[in-house]
Image (tube, coloured by chain):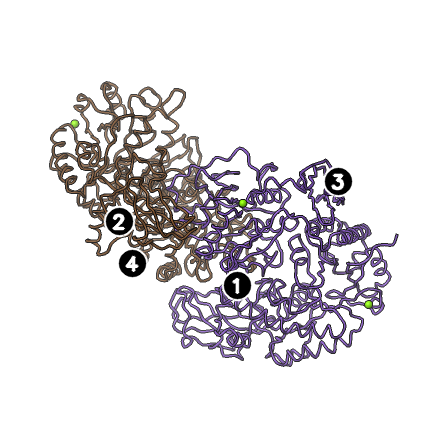
Chain colours: A brown, B purple
């Protein structure tokens, strides 16, 4: 039997031809890529595989950049907070910043582009009352109010590309030149990027796929005076701003932005901030510009007969794949890193590209591939996590990155990946384009909606943070669950109502964040629309501090729907009688313990009509409540685990009044799942764990039988509609 | 030796003469009181003791009240929240209320005195758009906005005195008449209360002390439809309102109050709410009126040759002893219940009375005095707790309440109280009027200031609540500590600055409450004044969420002073490098473990200049930070314990830069304390525990020696200034 082949991308490197061939064969790879720091030999480029070549648009061209430093990328930075102890206050702009990365822009008039803010009164200081000392990078305020705090928002030039800076510093690259990022909004830079690409396409005939890494503007990444990360926002539009962009924005939108629109009190419009209309306008403005310019490059690539692929990261700002201009770029493919089911779906669900590719873990670097460590464990975990999501919607390709020669030294790993790649192709061949059985449709409701599909609560591209893991579990659970998922913004609901096919809305997050919604919840249209929808039979699940905004006697503005609210101290004088959990509840039926993660304090039930499911330490952590024909569920937090996936699934079915359908295409054992594909009459019974599992497997009519699965097993079965 | 006598009040009852005499002798009692439910025999009244007689001003006169139901006391109540599902919405006013306690006031025009509020839009509904159905106690809104929530704020008559109602229901008094509270603001009631008292004073020649229980308006206590407590606010002015009071207020203050000024979104101006100017005006208005009317009664008492004593509770609204009109009432004494050191100080520190009396625990009721229980344990705990505070400022008398015959059945208890009363008199005789050594002066800063001296964070008169115990520990620790304590309001600071003699300011509480301060912290005068004061050498201690108000880039508005802030999610993108605790710190020097109670999540250090003292679970819970010549300390929570008292004391000395004075008049053992009285050259070394303790005792020069104390021992020593 011939080895199956395709849908797999291999990294390679110099002087590694034979081993590359061997691994291509064993893993069935049909594409080869270079990585940051590796180059491909000509012999490798001649192999029977697509060749991906990394391409940097706006960095790595220092000859050009150094001659056009006025076309360098810019950023708005905020100084530290400075407390005035007298009327004269000197502010050291660059204090805490990395002088090798940024320097103040004195080409553009500070009095026009900068802002000095009294952070105690909230007022902007009159430009006549401060001066800039360019020699010392200081702002001197002449008439400060003593004991008020002041900040300066100032434009800088970013003279070092953040990704190269990170790699440079991390790997001690010494005197290797700093790559200077230039701004393609500028005339010379714009001209340069086209002409350079045209020539490059001619010069690289072996390249099949131009892997843009990435386009124009890096996510916000600012280092501190010790050359360490100071601020990182994977969604940050900070580096897209410039004096030119501000003028263009005014031209396009009809009003001028302030430095404060970028600096945002020092929070820099983190995706946790409820976005202001001005910031949403700015995002739209940048996305529009980036899409137009990117399309030109993609057209050039296509004219050369190659494909255009975009890496989802680094200089990806403005290309957000769920944004409204993305399709117009005309990319063939997007590739991104897969660290979880949610990140897999973030890539796999991208519309308007011909294919997607997930770069799987572990990365072939010495931090995992060292003697004594077994990289199979990480690979297996990564695969099981991703496979749940792949079974809902597969990426079109998988790949790896790093040093192939390192991985080659671990034969068990090579064998394991051989198995994974075969399993991936098998899944893909069976189900790509086949709609899996979905028991219901969930909408994640927050301030970002569709734009940040599968990207909610994410900090610094999917790192663990104490403040987010109790919410990320919701997305991770859903990424591999037999439900449809969509992302709705508050504006969507206010403008168009809740889509007809949605069964359950989830609002999850800490109070005041874009994910919970903050002041949006004082909007009567929003609140009334959602109440009406639930009352008419909709389901609602609130996690953490849903609909939280202290207003008119409630902290949770949907308290009347949820049947719970949070005690902030104001209603301690009101007796709280409702503290007794129900004996049993559909939602908790399978659970033996609860884990609400960071959990939430001081939640209490409003009346005897609230069904308390978990009560401890004087607080409700899990409850349900009917509202008209609808139901709402409160959950104090939902870190990802098999138990919590089950809890969430039951909560969804309960909220949707679909309890009777819960045991269709279902596995009783929480470590197993059933994915059914009615149109092809196939089902996959999967063991998501690395241990043997026995489970009841329920078919579409709710009939069950016992099945035992090997560790990590996926078992395919055909089924008929007849019994 | 003759038994010492005096300063002790005994409850007595009928048919208990001989035992009363015996206990008077053993406990040295010089006063006898009746209790709720007990009466004194004439023989007892003739004993050589002052006789206290409970006197009710505005209840217990049903013959009068029933004939003047239009002079009954009133309340503003808020209906439940009602969600409109259509344009017509009917609201059942009395839903959830106790019809035996309150009934809607239809004598005064609802269109003038009531308010229907759209709680979704925040708007008041036009009076033309709703009607009252008096038969069914409903309000019908004709043009409701579907899915908006509505409430009705309505005036009721309170037809049952809350304390009598509570006792009546608790003790199953059956058809005993309900005592109807009348409003002395009304003409007949006002006339009646005077004339009745005049006669009563004549009719009760044996009474030496008229124990007002209490005056005119009960604290807010509302029962629910099951006849159980629904809302209780010991500070609540709810029952002082009436149509007449509203009109009088307008007359006096020049503007009219709205129902919302009382209903306050359903929070009813709980003392946790940051008080509005209107509510503060109303408090002032009521206090003024109550003081004027109370003075008339007190004058009558004095004219009769008796003393006037006020019970601190029940109908005490308007008499707040730290309010500005209290002195003008001319009371001889205040008596209140002592459950802690803080409540003892609340009574003992009352200015402008000739004497104060604390009613100690346990109350002589069967819940403690039953076979098999040892009431000595509770008495011993209560005494040790109160003794700390007595050693700072003694009440002038102590007393007990309940059934003396019950206590008499417990000879060990009788002996123990004999010891307590002797010890109390001994302490009193030594130190009354003597200023104890205080190492520094602390100001508790909140929205209430002096008015609520020793009363911060109190719910329902000193019950335990999950949301308060982590703050109450601050007051309890201070109540018996060798420091001066004062209470400052934000308005005080804004108007007059920080008093010169204050060493350390404490701001403790949950965000948004009157105790933390909420929106006050956006006031630039407040913030600048406090920053300046600290920078010039002042100390600041923040507990929980001090100065919390999200504004201009900080959550803690004193973040620059404290060196810490709270992560709400907005600054997750900013790297938090400062996580390493110092090796040792003055504040933690004596501690082996930390207990922050409910503690506080997500506190982080702003820079390397913050001295982190305790860091766990990814959070700072204890830290210090210099600010100019001053210092600030952050504490995540401080439930009362010996360890936390020590922590707070060290934090105070550290913040005040007085570390070198910490070991003056000090006990090394946390279960012991030293109270010094320099003007009389005496010191008390006390063991606050029920076990033997050995401690180093430091004198005023910091010299120490070892001392071993019996359980609960207080040891007096004389000292000279010479060594
Ligand atoms: Mg090729
Ligand atoms: Mg007498
Ligand atoms: Mg100082």
- Report which quarter residue A518 is drawn in: bottom left
Q: Which residue carries the number 4 mark?
A: A496
Mark 3 vs mark 4: tell me if same chain: no
**Disc 2 residue crowd, few under 14, some 14–19, many 20+, Cα 10 Å:** some
- Report which quarter residue A306 is drawn in: top left
Whether ligand 3 has any atom under 8 Å from the Cβ at mark 3 is answered as no
**Mark closer to the chain start, 3 or 1:** 1
Image location of residue A444, percent across then percent down: 35, 50
Q: Are marks 3 and 4 in contact (CB under 8 Å)?
A: no
Q: Observer-nearest residue: B408 or A663?
A: B408
Whether ligand 1 has any atom under 8 Å from the Cβ at mark 4 is answered as no
**Is label 2 or label 4 in front?**
2
Q: Which residue carries the number 1 mark?
A: B269
Residue A113 marker: 2
Q: CA distance from mark 2 to mark 3?
A: 72 Å
Q: CA distance from mark 1 to mark 2?
A: 46 Å
């Amino acid at each position: 039997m011939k080895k199956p082949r395709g849908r797999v991308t291999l990294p390679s490197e110099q002087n590694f031809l034979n081993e590359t061939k061997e691994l291509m064969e064993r893993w069935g790879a049909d594409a080869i890529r270079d990585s940051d720091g590796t180059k491909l030999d000509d012999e490798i480029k001649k192999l029977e595989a697509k060749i991906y070549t990394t391409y940097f648009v706006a960095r790595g061209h220092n000859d050009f950049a150094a001659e056009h430093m006025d076309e360098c990328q810019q950023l708005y930075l905020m100084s530290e907070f400075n407390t005035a102890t007298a009327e004269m206050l000197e502010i050291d702009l660059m204090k805490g910043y990395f002088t090798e990365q940024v320097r103040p822009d004195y080409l553009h008039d500070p009095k026009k582009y900068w802002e000095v803010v009294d952070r105690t009164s909230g007022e902007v200081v009159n430009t006549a009352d401060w001066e800039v000392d360019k020699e010392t990078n200081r702002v001197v305020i002449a008439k400060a109010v003593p004991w008020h705090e002041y900040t300066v928002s100032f434009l800088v030039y970013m003279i070092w590309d953040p990704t190269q800076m990170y790699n440079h510093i991390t790997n001690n690259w010494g005197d290797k030149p700093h790559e200077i990022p230039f701004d393609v909004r500028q005339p010379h830079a714009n001209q340069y990027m086209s002409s350079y690409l045209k020539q490059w396409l001619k010069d690289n005939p072996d390249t099949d796929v131009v892997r843009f890494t990435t386009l124009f503007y890096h996510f916000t990444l600012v280092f501190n005076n010790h050359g360490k990360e100071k601020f990182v926002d994977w969604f940050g539009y900070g580096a897209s701003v410039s004096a030119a962009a501000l003028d263009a924005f005014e031209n396009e939108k009809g009003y001028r932005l302030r430095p404060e629109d970028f600096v945002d009190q020092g929070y820099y419009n983190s995706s946790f901030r409820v976005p202001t209309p001005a910031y949403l306008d700015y995002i739209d403005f940048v996305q529009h510009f980036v899409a137009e310019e990117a399309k030109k490059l993609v057209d050039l690539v296509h004219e050369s007969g190659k494909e255009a692929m975009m890496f989802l990261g680094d200089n990806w700002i403005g290309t957000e794949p769920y944004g409204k201009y993305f399709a117009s770029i005309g990319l063939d493919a997007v590739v991104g890193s897969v660290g979880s089911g949610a990140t897999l779906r973030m890539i796999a669900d991208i519309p308007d590209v011909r294919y997607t590719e997930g770069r799987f873990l572990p990365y072939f670097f010495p931090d995992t591939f060292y003697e004594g460590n077994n990289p199979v464990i990480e690979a297996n975990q990564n695969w099981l996590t991703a496979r749940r999501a792949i079974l809902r919607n597969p990426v079109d390709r998988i790949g790896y990155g790093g040093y192939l020669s390192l991985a080659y030294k671990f034969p068990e790993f090579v064998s394991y990946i051989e198995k994974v790649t075969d399993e991936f192709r098998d899944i893909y061949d069976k189900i790509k384009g086949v709609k899996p059985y979905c028991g219901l449709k969930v909408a994640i409701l927050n301030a970002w909606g569709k734009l940040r599909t599968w990207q909610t609560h994410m900090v610094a591209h999917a790192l663990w943070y104490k403040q987010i893991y109790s919410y990320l579990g919701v997305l991770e659970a859903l990424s591999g669950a037999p439900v449809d998922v969509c992302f709705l913004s508050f504006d969507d609901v206010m403008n168009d109502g809740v889509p007809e096919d949605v069964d359950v809305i989830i609002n999850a997050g800490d109070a005041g964040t874009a994910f919970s919604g903050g002041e949006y919840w004082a909007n009567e249209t929003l609140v009334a629309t959602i109440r009406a929808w639930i009352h008419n039979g909709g389901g609602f699940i609130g996690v953490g501090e849903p609909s939280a905004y202290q207003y008119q006697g409630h902290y949770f503005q949907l308290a009347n729907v949820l049947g719970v609210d949070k005690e902030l101290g104001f209603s301690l004088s009101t007796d709280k009688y409702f503290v007794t959990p129900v004996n049993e509840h559909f939602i908790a039926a399978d659970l033996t313990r609860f884990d609400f993660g960071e959990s939430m304090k001081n939640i209490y039930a409003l009346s005897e009509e609230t069904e308390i499911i978990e009560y401890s330490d004087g607080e409700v952590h899990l409850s349900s409540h009917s509202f008209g024909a609808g139901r709402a569920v409160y959950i104090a937090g939902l870190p990802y685990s098999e138990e919590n996936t089950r809890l969430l699934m039951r909560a969804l079915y309960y909220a949707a009044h679909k309890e009777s359908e819960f045991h269709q295409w279902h596995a009783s054992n929480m470590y197993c799942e059933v994915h059914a594909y009615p149109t092809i009459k196939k089902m996959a019974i999967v063991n998501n764990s690395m241990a043997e599992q026995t489970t009841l497997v329920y078919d579409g009519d709710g009939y069950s039988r016992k099945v035992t699965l090997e560790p990590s097993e996926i078992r395919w079965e055909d089924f008929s509609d007849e019994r």
